[in-house]
Structures are given as structure tokens and as C-alpha cells.
């Protein structure tokens, strides 16, 4: 029964990675940039909820809505101010380094406002625990909520991208920015919208992360951010189902690694699996293999 | 013996046979044209000859040596050099260095010799500089030796590609639409240069071209390709008058 | 043609000159008592990061591959050389330190080859994430490693208890606690770590500059500019990518040696991806493919947080803002055009020439 118990923990953690990875993957698909600050938006979102509930006395639902709005706006502002001036820069490393700068900025702002000590997070989502097989398998409410949220987001995004006009504009921009522009797609607005969605999702991921692991510091987002990035690459960066599968696989591998091998090398195992996957499939599980035309 | 001998060359991409049953025989010192409508498979043939694609069937012989299925690098060492339809220069390197990269396999010293600056480094570098300048002079690019290749005007970039290809000391030179995007004056100048290269280096050249005037002006023989297959082959003036060729080009 | 040769040679000489001049200035300041303890403490790390930045520029700038695992190679160089220094404590200090440098470089180079062969098949951002992954794996594995030695030789285990050292044996590497007291093994050499660091910076510059301006260097850059064209003129792209990657790893290993021996406590937690990213920041801000830029950016950005100490909590915030603003100013096309216009006004009509 412990196997199933680890599996559900893995899927739950993986679902959080998947939600973060979705943000990574969409932004990469559209803007062709690694948004290193994405993980820190998660942390910001979590702080907004914590502050709204503890200091502002808001109801959980209102706090969550506020956090999503805050992060959505934050994502758009970051894109406008820090990334869009570099969109036509001669090297795409420039925007990568700027993203690192933004990551430092968010972390240090949080450090200044909230301090370095770990805050214990409040319970915002209160769903009763599910007990199965005479209590042999206990599934926490938050686990169920996390997994369900992930599924809803993924299905919603697939629908959005494939069936709606702005979603198809996103696809067009990621396929060929110049051609999309010529066909009348507003490229700037589409990129802005992608950052908005990705950052909004980061707020939700931040909430779920802090419900499962209820401590919060200015650096809380950094490692999950990197892991989600790994998950996105794992699944084939730019692919929505890829991010989902990659995220869940990574979560499961991490929890199994911790449980059955050693908690100290669990990260190493995650990274090693990534390397093996990329060596076998150089563009990830669901990635498109694009050959340069001669 | 022919310099290039190709028999029954074919390649299949999924269900599409992009090139099928292609034969050609080019004599040493010949200027040979490969023409055909868009999508006829001309560049694919270049990619097959240079090892970018591996042929599904057929045999390619260069100067009697079987080079079928070899890698791009081996084929270049065997003696085929090429230019590209969409110019592929080493943009962030000076014009001179572009040619010196072409000389890479012919003027050698080890990495360690380079780092330690042993006497051999200076000797070989001097040889390379002289050789590179000599080639650049042929193309009237010697004055731009220090310019970054990416900053050259379009016509000169095309010339530099030919210069770089020649630096590898090939037996056969493949030119992929060398006159694309050039004005009539530049095209005329290019024709003179290609002829000069043929005479001066005793070069065998196979060129892909859309510009009929250029082909008619300098190629002794041509092959016309349509839908991956040879439509006509032979003396240029005769082939260009062939009704089948005229139809393929002008439609009905 | 003659002029280019002279220009590159002159540029290279200027770079050596800058390093030597900085060294002389520091010596004068320190001799006249104008150097605070704080700044003195920064000198050796500054050499470490300069070497790391120059060597990373070989991969990022000249070979055109994004590597986020540079700290991993530093880590390998640091630990292998520190282990050697402890084990070979009978050898006199000077030859031992030289051997330690060589061993650090060699082990890092071996890792460079082992990692480079599979990884360099990947491109762009995929390569970046895999190098990051390798860096993290190296860090994670050393973190659980325990190494000691006694009269029976070397013992390696994953916990202190499993080392099973004989009486009189010595535990060197203690997992997450790392290796301590390496610097103390070099009582006489220790005071010269800064001049040694400067020599190593010069050596790194010498290797990278001469490599770049040689036949192999041209092949490396040709591969960066256009791999299909490079192959078409007979350049073995895998070979030259691997060459650049390995030399870069070896030099990072040297930086790691200096880093390890300068610390009283060598811990693996320092070598995380943040360190790799920090070095990448130096390289990109200084200019991709511009070695002098790497040096200057390293000095400024490394010293900046220290100089901002007076601002206490705000210093890292200021650092982040400076970083973003500098990136935008240096790289945004709009800012570049604006700068070009201003320069043109200042210099009259001569302002059009863009430095490479």
C-alpha cells in the first residue's frame, strides 16, 4: 500500500510541476525564451495569498482571486518592461540574463518586504481527507484538489489553444512570428496574453505548492521553477500535453527516488532521467523534431 | 573517365520520391547546368551529392572513386565543394577567415602548436594568408579581407561563398543558384568569374540556375529536371529548344 | 591583412596589460595600507571568477553553445585537487600546488569529455538544461560522498560509518560538510595565492586567446556561425565543439583549484546552478565572445555587491536592477540605435563603425 501512497504523492507533486511547466512551455513556445523568473512569480503569488488572508483578513476565495490577478498583471508588466525591448536583440542570451535579473529582483523585493525567515502557510483549501481500505490509504483533500485542478487547467488550455481565436493566434505566433504578423495577428498582444496566462497559472501553482508544503520563503519558487523547467523540456518544450506528462513523471520520479533510494540524491535522479530522455529523444517526449533545411 | 558519374540516383522521403533514376556524367573541366522548375529536386540532388542526404538507391562516383553514402566531411575531403541557395557564410568572421576555414584541411598544424605559438604556427599561417588572398583576388574581394562576412553586400557574399568552396581545393564545384538576387550587371560579372575559375583552376562545375540567359551563356551541357526525373539532357542549345522542356517551363 | 594581425595581437597584449596593471595597482594600494581587509579578501575569488568567465566565454562566445553547468566543472576541479593536496601532504608545498592545479584541470577535462560527447549532440536550450542537470548531479553526488585514507589506501563510502578507516586514518571529505583545512596545508604558498591567481588568469587568457586566433579556433567559430557550411568545407563539427568544451572545462577546473585552496571550508553547496548562472551573467554582460568584456564585467559585478554593503538589505535589490538596466542598455535594439545616434553626434560622421 505504501507504493500507492507514494504514487499519489508523486502525482500530486507532479501536478504542481505540471502547472508551472505549462507556464514555462507556453512562454517558450511563443517568445522562444527561458523565463527564469517564472518560478519566482509562484513565490509572489503565495505571498499575496498569505498576506491577504493573515493581514487583510480576506476570505480564501477572494485571496486566491486577488493573487491570480496580481500575478497576471505582474507577468504582463515584466514582459513589457524587461523582455519586449529585447525581442529583436541580436542574441537570445540577452533576454535570458534579463530574466535572471528579474528573478533576483523578485526574490530580493520579497526578502525586503517579508524577511528571510520561513513563514508557515495558512490552510486556505479545506477539503476533508479521504480514507480508503480501512484507513490503509489516506488521501489528503489537498492532494485530490491539486490533481483535479491540474486536469481542469490542462483540458481548459487545450480547448483554449485549439478552439478559440486568441488560442489559435498563439499557435500561429509560436509557429512563425513574422508570418503571423503578416496574417494580421497582433503579435505583441498575443505574447502579452501568453505571459498573463502563464503567470496566472503560477499563482495557482504557488497556492497548491504552499498547501502541500506549508512553508514560504523568498526562495520557495526557485527550485520548483527549475524542476518545472526540467519537466517542460522532458515532455518536449512548447507542448502542452508534454508539460503535463513531463511534470507528473518528474513528480513521481522524485517521490519514488526519495522513498526508495535516498532523499539526498532524489534531485540527481530526476536530472539523470532527464538526460537519458533527451539523449534518446533530443527534443523531449512530445517535442517536434525539426530538421534544418539545407 | 568522367569527373562525376551518377547512376540511378534516387531518394525517397516517406511516400515521395523526390529524385528518381537520376543519371549524369560530367567530364573534367566541363561547365554543366542543372535546371528545372521549382521543386523539381535540383537542390535535393546537390544534397545527395554532398552527403547531406543519403540516397535510397544509386551510385555516385567522383573521379572514379565511389563516394555513395559517405559523410559531408568525407565527401568534401574527396573533392566536392558547394555553395548554398540561401547564403551560408561564417557571418561573424572576417572575409579572410572565411576562406581560411576553407583551407583548414590543406594547411595543418595541431591545436597545441596554435596555443603555444610554435614556429610552425607562423609558417603555416603565413602560407594560409597568402593562399587566401590569392583566392580573394580572383573574386575581387581582397580589399574587403578584414570586413565581417555578414557586412558584405549581397553580390559579394555570393562570391565569397564560391571563394570559400574553392579554398577546399575541390575537383568538382557545385553552385546552387549563384546568380539569385543579382542584377544583370552583377550576373554578367559572375558569369565571367565562373568562366575564369573554370579556365584558371581547370575546374569542373555543376550549377543550378533559374536564369536561362546565364545557363545558355556558359553551360556546354545541361540536364533538365522535372518532378525528380530527368526530362531532357544534352547540348544546352538543343535541350532548351526541346518542346517538352518548353512545356515544363511555360506550362500549357 | 597585416593590419588585422597587428590589431588582434595588440588587443591580446592590451588584455595581458590590463591584468598586470591591476595587479600592480593592488600591490601598491596594499603596500601603502589603502586596501581594506574586506577588499583583500576579494582578490583571490576575483581571480577565480575571472578565470571561470573567460573559460565559459570560450564555450558561449566562440563555440556558440549555452552551458549552464560551468560550476560543475569548477566543483570537480576543486574537490579532486583538494583531495590530492590532503593525500599527498608529504610532497613539498610548491610542487604539490602545481600538481594540484594540473590534477584539477585534468579531472575537469575528463569530465568535460565524458559530458560533452553525449551532450553536444543537443542544441540550444536543450543543451543548456542538460548542462545544468549535469552540474546539479555532480553537486548531489559529491554531497553524499565520504572519502578518507589510512595505511591501506583510499576509502570511499556514502556515510562516515562505512568508511571503516584503520586507527590513524584520516577522513578528508565528509559529505555535505565538505573538505576543511586545505589552505592550511600550504602555509608558505598561501600568502601568494593572489599573485598565483593573477598568473593563472594570464595563463587562461594566453590559452583562450591563442586558441581562438588559430586554425582550430577558426574551425570552432565556423561551427558556431553555420554548422552546415562548416561541414561542407570539411570541418568536423563534433570534434571542434568538444575541443572548446573540454578546454573550457579544464580551465574551469583550474578556477576550482584556486577556489578550493583559498577556503578554509570547501562545501559543495556553493557550486549550484546559481554559480553557473552568475558566471554566465559576467560573460553575457561583458559581451559574448569579448574576453576583455568578461574580465571587466567580472570585476565590476563581483565587486558591486561588496561595494554596496553600506546599503545593507537593499544591495541585492540594487544589484538586480543594475543588471536588468545594463542588459537593456547593452542589448535592446532601441537602446543600441539611440547610443549609435548619440555617438554619431559626438564623433561627427565617424561614429558608424561598430566594434566587433
Image (tube, coloured by chain):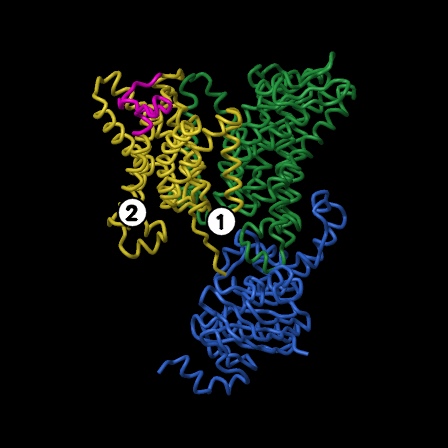
Chain colours: A yellow, B blue, C green
Identify which residue, A206 or C351, lies in the foreground: A206
Q: Where is residue A63 in the image (x, y as percent from the top left)?
A: 24, 24
In the image, the segment drawn in magenta is A120-145
Q: Position of residue A169 (x, y in %)?
A: 28, 50
Q: In this view, does B108 lie above or below C305?
A: below
Asked whether A142 falls inside the magenta stretch, the response is yes
Asked whether C341 falls inside the magenta stretch, the response is no
Dot in front, 2 or 1: 2
Identify which residue, A236 or C298, lies in the foreground: A236
Residue C297 placement, left or right of C217: left
The residue tagged with tag 2: helix, strand or loop? helix
Q: Which residue is drawn at 31% across and 53% down?
A: A181
Cα separation, mark 2 vs mark 1, equals 46 Å
Kindly identify which numbered label has been placed on residue C140. none
Residue A56 placement, left or right of B65: left
Q: Is residue A62 above or below residue B15?
A: above
Q: Where is residue A289 in the image (x, y as percent from the top left)?
A: 46, 52
Where's the N terminus of chain C, which quadrant? Answer: bottom right
Identify which residue, B34 or C312, lies in the foreground: B34
Instruction: Say whether residue A102 is visible.
Output: no
Q: Mark 2 points at which residue?
A: A161
Q: Where is residue B241 in the image (x, y as percent from the top left)?
A: 46, 87
Disc 2: CA contacts within 10 A as few (<14), some (14-19) or many (>=20): some
Amino acid at each position: 500500500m505504501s507504493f500507492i501512497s507514494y504514487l499519489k504523492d508523486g502525482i500530486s507533486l507532479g501536478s504542481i510541476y505540471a502547472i508551472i511547466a505549462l507556464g514555462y512551455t507556453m512562454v517558450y513556445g511563443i517568445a522562444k525564451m527561458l523565463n527564469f523568473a517564472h518560478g519566482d512569480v509562484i513565490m509572489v503569488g503565495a505571498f499575496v495569498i498569505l498576506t491577504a488572508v493573515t493581514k487583510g483578513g480576506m476570505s480564501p476565495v477572494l485571496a486566491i482571486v486577488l493573487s491570480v490577478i496580481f500575478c497576471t498583471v505582474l507577468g504582463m508588466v515584466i514582459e513589457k518592461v524587461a523582455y519586449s525591448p529585447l525581442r529583436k536583440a541580436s542574441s537570445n542570451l540577452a533576454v535570458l540574463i534579463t530574466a535572471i535579473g528579474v528573478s533576483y529582483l523578485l526574490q530580493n523585493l520579497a526578502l525586503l518586504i517579508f524577511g528571510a525567515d520561513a513563514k508557515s502557510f495558512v490552510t486556505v483549501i479545506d477539503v476533508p481527507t479521504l480514507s480508503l481500505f480501512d484507513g490503509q490509504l489516506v488521501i489528503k483533500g489537498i492532494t485530490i484538489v491539486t490533481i483535479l485542478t491540474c486536469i481542469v487547467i490542462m483540458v481548459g488550455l487545450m480547448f483554449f489553444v485549439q478552439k478559440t481565436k486568441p488560442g489559435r493566434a498563439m499557435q500561429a505566433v509560436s509557429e512563425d512570428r513574422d508570418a503571423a504578423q503578416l496574417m494580421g495577428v497582433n503579435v505583441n498582444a498575443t505574447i502579452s496574453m501568453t505571459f498573463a496566462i502563464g503567470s496566472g497559472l503560477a499563482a495557482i501553482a504557488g497556492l497548491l505548492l504552499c498547501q502541500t508544503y506549508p512553508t514560504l520563503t523568498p526562495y520557495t519558487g526557485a527550485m520548483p521553477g527549475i524542476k518545472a523547467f526540467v519537466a517542460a523540456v522532458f515532455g518536449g518544450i512548447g507542448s502542452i500535453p508534454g508539460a503535463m506528462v513531463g511534470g507528473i513523471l518528474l513528480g513521481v520520479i522524485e517521490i519514488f527516488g526519495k522513498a526508495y533510494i535516498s532523499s539526498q540524491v532524489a534531485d540527481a535522479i530526476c536530472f539523470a532521467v532527464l538526460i537519458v530522455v533527451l539523449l534518446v529523444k533530443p527534443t523531449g517526449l512530445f517535442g517536434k523534431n525539426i530538421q534544418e533545411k539545407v | 573517365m568522367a569527373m562525376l558519374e551518377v547512376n540511378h540516383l534516387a531518394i525517397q522521403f516517406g511516400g515521395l520520391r523526390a529524385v528518381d533514376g537520376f543519371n549524369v556524367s560530367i567530364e573534367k573541366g566541363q561547365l554543366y547546368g542543372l535546371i528545372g522548375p521549382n521543386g523539381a529536386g535540383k537542390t535535393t540532388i546537390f544534397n545527395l551529392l554532398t552527403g547531406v542526404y543519403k540516397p535510397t538507391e544509386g551510385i555516385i562516383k567522383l573521379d572514379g572513386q565511389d563516394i555513395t553514402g559517405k559523410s559531408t566531411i568525407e565527401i568534401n575531403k574527396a573533392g566536392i565543394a558547394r555553395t548554398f541557395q540561401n547564403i551560408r557564410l561564417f557571418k561573424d568572421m572576417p572575409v579572410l577567415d572565411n576562406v581560411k576555414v576553407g583551407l583548414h584541411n590543406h594547411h595543418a598544424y595541431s591545436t597545441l602548436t596554435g596555443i603555444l605559438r610554435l614556429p610552425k604556427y607562423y609558417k603555416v599561417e603565413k602560407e594560409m594568408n597568402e593562399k587566401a588572398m590569392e583566392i580573394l583576388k580572383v573574386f575581387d574581394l581582397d580589399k574587403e579581407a578584414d570586413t565581417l562576412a555578414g557586412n558584405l553586400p549581397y553580390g559579394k557574399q555570393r562570391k565569397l561563398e564560391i571563394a570559400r568552396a574553392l579554398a577546399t581545393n575541390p575537383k568538382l564545384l557545385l553552385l546552387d543558384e549563384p546568380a539569385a538576387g543579382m542584377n544583370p550587371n552583377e550576373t554578367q560579372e559572375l558569369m565571367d568569374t565562373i568562366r575564369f575559375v573554370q579556365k584558371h583552376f581547370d575546374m569542373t562545375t555543376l550549377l543550378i540556375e533559374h536564369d536561362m540567359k546565364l545557363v545558355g551563356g556558359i553551360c556546354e551541357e545541361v540536364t533538365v529536371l522535372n518532378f525528380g526525373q530527368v526530362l531532357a539532357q544534352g547540348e544546352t542549345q538543343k535541350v532548351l529548344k526541346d518542346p517538352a522542356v518548353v512545356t515544363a517551363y511555360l506550362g500549357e | 591583412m597585416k593590419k588585422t594581425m597587428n590589431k588582434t595581437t595588440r588587443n591580446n597584449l592590451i588584455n595581458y596589460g590590463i591584468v598586470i596593471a591591476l595587479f600592480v595597482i593592488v600591490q601598491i594600494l596594499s603596500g601603502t595600507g589603502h586596501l581594506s581587509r574586506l577588499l583583500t579578501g576579494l582578490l583571490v575569488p576575483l581571480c577565480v571568477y575571472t578565470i571561470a568567465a573567460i573559460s565559459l566565454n570560450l564555450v558561449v562566445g566562440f563555440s556558440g553553445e549555452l552551458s549552464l553547468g560551468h560550476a560543475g566543472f569548477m566543483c570537480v576541479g576543486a574537490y579532486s585537487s583538494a583531495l590530492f593536496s590532503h593525500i599527498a601532504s608529504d610532497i613539498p608545498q610548491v610542487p604539490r600546488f602545481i600538481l594540484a592545479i594540473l590534477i584539477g584541470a585534468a579531472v575537469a577535462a575528463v569530465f568535460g569529455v565524458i559530458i560533452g560527447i553525449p551532450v553536444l549532440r543537443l542544441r540550444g536550450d536543450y543543451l543548456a538544461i542538460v548542462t545544468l542537470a549535469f552540474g546539479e548531479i555532480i553537486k548531489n553526488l559529491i554531497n553524499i560522498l565520504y572519502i578518507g585514507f589510512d595505511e591501506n589506501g583510499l576509502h570511499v563510502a556514502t556515510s562516515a560509518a562505512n568508511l571503516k578507516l584503520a586507527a590513524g586514518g584520516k577522513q578528508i571529505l565528509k559529505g555535505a560538510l565538505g573538505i576543511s583545512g586545505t589552505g592550511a596545508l600550504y602555509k608558505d604558498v598561501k600568502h601568494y595565492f593572489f599573485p598565483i591567481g593573477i598568473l593563472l588568469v594570464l595563463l587562461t587568457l594566453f590559452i583562450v586567446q591563442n586558441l581562438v586566433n588559430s586554425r582550430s579556433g577558426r574551425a570552432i567559430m565556423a561551427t558556431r556561425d553555420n554548422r552546415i557550411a562548416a561541414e561542407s568545407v570539411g570541418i568536423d563539427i563534433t570534434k571542434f565543439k568538444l575541443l572548446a568544451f573540454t578546454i573550457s572545462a579544464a580551465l574551469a577546473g583550474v578556477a576550482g583549484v584556486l577556489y578550493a585552496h583559498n577556503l578554509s571550508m570547501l562545501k559543495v553547496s556553493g557550486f549550484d546552478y546559481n554559480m553557473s548562472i552568475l558566471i554566465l551573467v559576467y560573460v553575457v554582460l561583458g559581451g559574448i565572445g569579448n574576453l576583455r568584456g568578461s574580465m571587466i564585467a567580472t570585476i565590476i559585478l563581483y565587486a558591486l555587491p561588496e561595494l554596496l554593503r553600506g546599503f545593507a538589505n537593499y544591495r541585492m535589490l540594487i544589484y538586480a536592477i543594475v543588471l536588468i538596466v545594463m542588459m537593456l542598455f547593452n542589448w535592446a535594439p532601441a537602446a543600441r540605435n539611440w547610443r549609435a545616434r548619440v555617438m554619431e553626434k559626438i564623433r561627427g560622421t565617424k561614429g558608424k563603425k561598430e566594434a566587433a
